[in-house]
Image (tube, rainbow, N blue to C red):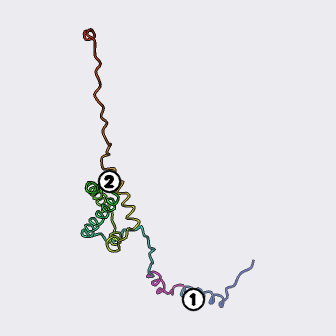
Amino acid sequence: MKSYKINKNLLCATLTSIVVAILIGGCSDSDKAKETAKAPVHEVFNPFDHSKDEPVTVDEKHKFHDAFAAQCVARELKNSVNKEEDALRFTKSCECVTTYMLKDLTDEEVEKYLSEHENPRSLQIKFNSAAYHCAQQQPIDKGFKSYAPPAVKKEEGFFSKFF
């Protein structure tokens, strides 16, 4: 068997390298860690996220309601033959549509409609949904009621009354 002799130079070099390795590992640059933690995170724009939108004020909703209902009635009356009678009917249905649309109206849609006078696609989708809802709420007009003349009674003979 071979026995190993520990040399003083080998022992001194090993201990020195261990101490140097511990000191180098312990002296890390903590400023870089702080800088990476503070780096601003860039949020990706999500057009469907309306959680950070400003709420629509009551005044803006009222202006939108009046303007949109007036535009709806004017659009419906454009091809109408009897404008006076149709105006009452269309006013009622347009009020229903506009009131239903106000439930989930965003600030951007109100701003585009009132200030820029344009109808965004989301407003058109809400209009279609509201029109369907209001059409379901109104009773269905069945048209003219059929009128059947009274049935003609058959003349009965004298003896048929008794039997």
Where is 10 relative to 78, above or below? below
Residue 103 spot, x, y in % from top left: 30, 61
Quadrant including the C terminus: top left
Residue 153 vs residue 32: left or right? left
Q: Secondary structure at mark 2?
A: helix
Residue 122 spot, x, y in % from top left: 39, 65
Q: Quadrant of residue 145?
A: top left
Residue 20's disc number: 1
Span colored in magenta? 25-38
Q: Report the predominant secondary structure element of the magenta stretch.
A: helix
Please tell me how crowded label 2 is: few (under 14), some (14-19), or many (20+) other residues with Cα within 10 Å.
Answer: some
The amino acid type found where label 1 is placed reads Val
Name the residue at the bottom extreme. Answer: 9
Residue 18 vs residue 115: left or right? right
Quadrant including the N terminus: bottom right
Residue beneath disc 2: 134
**Nearer to us in this view, 107 or 15:** 107
